[in-house]
Image (spheres, rainbow, N blue to C red):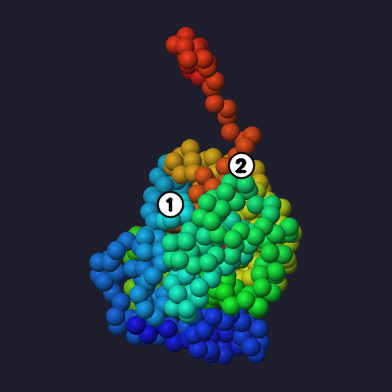
């Protein structure tokens, strides 16, 4: 196909050939995939995209692979839900939920990035894939990797929710639980990646992996009838997803599939781990690392690799950022479930709660169109809600017992 020109340093602009590398040898800046946009513009039309199967691979010319897709052929193209009931409750005109609680096969947006990373790992000829994960990436690498026939080494903080550990182990990877934070896990993995010739999806394959996040942005635009929303609210861990959603809009504009981009991009984080939101609020591009302490474990990266770039994307777009407390996260998870019937994990609570704050502050205009990116399924982290929900009604198997309870319910 040949739509990729190579890799390019985000800091100094030095160019590299396509290889499993991720930092610039000269300035240690991160490498990013560079594309031949004029060539893509010639071959990729809205019609062509619309005629393809409903997966993230319908945008394959804008993804960093050489041959045909090999992994995650059913991943992506999740619903964009018009959230009428929730919008009315919040006094908003037009609110949409990009619902990545239902990505195939592991129910989080990580299935997008891993589909791309493992296709690339196959092209590079790796037989072993690995990752450092806050939970969702573990599931996705374990599952996609099983199907694609890779050996799998998965590194997680040992404090992860029990349900997230079980949902990794079922795919029978080599699961390494490290006594430390995600940032400790990540540091350890960088050392391991230096010694072993494995495809670490978020280390040496990261430039390719990260590109998979763009598909969430492409889908939003296509599903809105080839229009970009006025606002998009994105949860941030490393900050990669946010930067790639911004990139996806600019790319569609560049290749003529979208008019002028006026979308404002907003970052959502937990108060207990909000280095990116804090930088945005303080208007500084110095990201101060923090020690995470939040229920939103999937977003608990204290030293975010793409924090500076997320900050820049937000500023460039005229957006903003906000952080929310654990209580606000839980309340928003319940609100989303009760109004729209969507059970999101804690990260979804972060995103909705942040949007509500931004609306209250007037930073998001109620009369504009807004998309919130809901990135993972609540069934994965049910512990987060323990003690926060109304109890079930316990009864004996007797009609009279039911009627007694019914009376109580009607009184409420
Ligand atoms: C990984 C993840 C994100 C965002 O991650 P980035 O590192 O910022 O790209 C958002 N939501 C969920 C549920 C995740 O697992
Ligand atoms: Zn450089």
Local SS, label 2? helix
Residue 74 visible somewhere in the drawing: yes
Residue that badge 2 annotates: 383
**Residue at 42% across, 83% down:** 4
- Residue 170: image x %, image y %? 52, 51
Badge 2, how many Cα within 10 Å: few under 14, some, many 20+? some
Q: Quadrant of residue 74?
A: bottom left
Local SS, label 1? helix
Residue that badge 1 annotates: 102
Q: 380 or 101, which is in the foreground?
A: 380
Badge 1, how many Cα within 10 Å: few under 14, some, many 20+? many
**Residue at 69% across, 74% down:** 191
Q: Is residue 66 above or below residue 131?
A: below
Q: Is residue 397 above or below residue 292?
A: above
Q: 392 or 73, which is in the foreground?
A: 73
Instruction: Give the residue at the far top of this rendering.
Output: 400
The first of marks 2 and 1 along the sequence is: 1
- Residue 9: image x %, image y %? 57, 85
Q: 140 or 394, which is in the foreground?
A: 140
């Amino acid at each position: 196909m040949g739509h990729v020109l190579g890799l390019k340093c985000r800091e100094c602009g030095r160019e590299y050939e396509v290889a499993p590398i991720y930092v610039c040898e000269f300035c240690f800046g991160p490498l990013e995939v560079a594309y031949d946009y004029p060539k893509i513009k010639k071959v990729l039309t809205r019609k062509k995209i619309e005629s393809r199967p409903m997966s993230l691979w319908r945008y394959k010319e804008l993804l960093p692979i050489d041959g045909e897709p090999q992994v995650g052929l059913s991943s992506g193209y999740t619903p964009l839900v018009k959230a009428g009931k929730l919008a009315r409750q919040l006094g908003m005109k037009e609110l949409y939920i990009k619902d990545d609680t239902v990505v195939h096969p592991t129910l989080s947006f990580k299935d997008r990035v891993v589909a791309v990373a493992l296709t690339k790992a196959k092209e590079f000829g790796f037989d072993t894939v690995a990752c450092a994960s806050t939970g969702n990436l573990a599931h996705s690498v374990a599952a996609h990797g099983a199907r694609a026939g890779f050996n799998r080494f998965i590194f997680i903080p040992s404090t992860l929710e029990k349900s997230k550990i079980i949902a990794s182990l079922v795919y029978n990877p080599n699961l390494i639980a490290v006594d430390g934070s995600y940032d400790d896990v990540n540091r350890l993995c960088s050392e391991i990646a230096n010694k072993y010739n494995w495809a670490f999806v978020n280390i040496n394959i990261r430039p390719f992996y990260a590109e998979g996040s763009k598909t969430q942005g492409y889908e939003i635009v296509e599903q809105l009838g080839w229009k970009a929303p006025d606002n998009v609210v994105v949860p941030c861990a490393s900050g990669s997803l946010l930067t790639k959603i911004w990139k996806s809009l600019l790319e569609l504009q560049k290749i003529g599939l979208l008019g002028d981009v006026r979308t404002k991009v907003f970052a959502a984080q937990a108060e207990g781990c909000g280095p990116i939101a804090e930088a945005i609020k303080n208007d500084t591009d110095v990201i101060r690392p923090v020690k995470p302490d939040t229920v939103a474990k999937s977003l608990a990266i204290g030293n975010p690799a793409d924090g500076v770039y997320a900050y820049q994307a937000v500023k460039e777009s005229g957006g903003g950022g906000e952080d929310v407390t654990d209580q606000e996260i839980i309340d928003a998870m319940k609100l989303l479930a009760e109004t729209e019937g969507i059970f999101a994990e804690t990260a979804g609570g972060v995103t909705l709660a942040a949007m509500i704050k931004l609306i209250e502050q007037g930073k998001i205009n109620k009369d504009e169109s807004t998309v919130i990116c809901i990135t993972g399924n609540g069934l994965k982290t049910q512990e987060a809600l323990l003690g926060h929900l109304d109890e079930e009604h316990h009864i004996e198997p007797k009609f009279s017992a039911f009627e007694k309870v019914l009376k109580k319910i009607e009184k409420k």
